[in-house]
Structures are given as C-alpha cells and as structure tokens.
Image (tube, grey):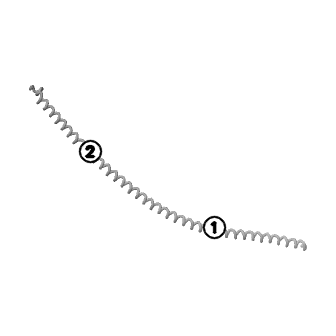
Amino acid sequence: MPESDLIQRQRRILADLAQLVVARDDDHAEKELAAKLDVLEAEFRQASDVVRSKHDTELASAEADFQLQRGRVTSAVQKATDEVQSTYRQVSEQALADCEKERAEAQRVCDDTLFEIAGMFEAGENALKAKYGDIEGGTE
C-alpha cells in the first residue's frame, strides 16, 4: 500500500476516533444531565413530601380548631335555644295563669252582678207588690 493511502487511512481512523470521542463525550454529558435530573427529582420529591406533610399537619390542626369552635358555637346556640324555650314556657304558663285569674275574676264579677240584678229585680217586684198588690197571685 502506498504511503498516501496509509495516511488517508490513518486520517479516516483518527476522524472516526474523534467522532467516537465526541459521541462518548456527548453521551457522558447526557449521562451527567440524567444523573443531575435524578438528583433534582429526588430533592423535589423530598421537598414535596415535606410540604405535603406540613400541609397535612396544618390541615389537621385547622380541622381540629374548626371542630372545637363548631362545638363551642353549637353548645352556645343550644344553650341560647334552651333559655329561649324555657323563658317562652315560663311566660306562656304565667300568661295562661294570669288569663285564668282574669277569667275567674270576670266570672265572679258576672255572677255577683247577676245576683245583684236578680236581687234588685226581686226587691223591685216586692216593692211593686206591696204598693199595687200581687197581680199574678190575685191580690190587690
């Protein structure tokens, strides 16, 4: 083989070798990026887990506070409702008792008035009988 062919062949081999080195370096850079990406993904997962855990803790705490406040409000509302019902019941019972007293008093006054009217009627009738005689009974 002539010397120029050998030189050309060496040049081709060197060029192919250079391409392999470049390809290897490119592959190496890709592997480095993949490794960095894996590290970053792991860090992201870890940070995400920390944030999620913190969020879950805060949510649980907020839920517990909400339930506590809800219980207090419910208790206060129930107490107020019970007081209103008790007051209503007492006022209603007192109003009914007062109404019954007034009705009984009105009935007593009515009975007394009827008795007085009957008494006045009888007295008037007796006075007329004494003055004019008993027309119904036949005495004059």
Callout 2 amino acid = Glu
Q: Nearer the viewer, residue 112 or 120?
A: 120
Query: Which residue is found at the position 41% from the left and 56% from the top?
Result: 77
Above or below residue 1? Residue 56 is above
Q: Which residue is mark 1?
A: 41
SS of the residue at dot 2?
A: helix
Q: Position of residue 83 (x, y in %)?
A: 36, 55
User: Can you name the residue that lies furthest to the left here?
Assistant: 139
Give the quadrant of the N terminus: bottom right
Query: Which residue is found at the position 22% from the left and 39% from the top?
Result: 110
Query: Which residue is found at the position 30% from the left and 48% from the top?
Result: 95
Q: Nearer the viewer, residue 30 or 135?
A: 135
Give the quadrant of the C terminus: top left
Disc number placed over residue 102 in the picture, else none: 2
Above or below residue 58? Residue 124 is above
Q: Is residue 118 left or right of residue 17?
A: left
Q: Nearer the viewer, residue 62 or 98?
A: 98
Q: Is residue 73 left or right of residue 48?
A: left
Query: Which residue is found at the position 32% from the left and 49% from the top?
Result: 92
Disc number placed over residue 28 in the picture, else none: none
Q: Position of residue 48 (x, y in %)?
A: 59, 66
SS of the residue at dot 1?
A: helix
Rendered image quadrant of residue 4:
bottom right
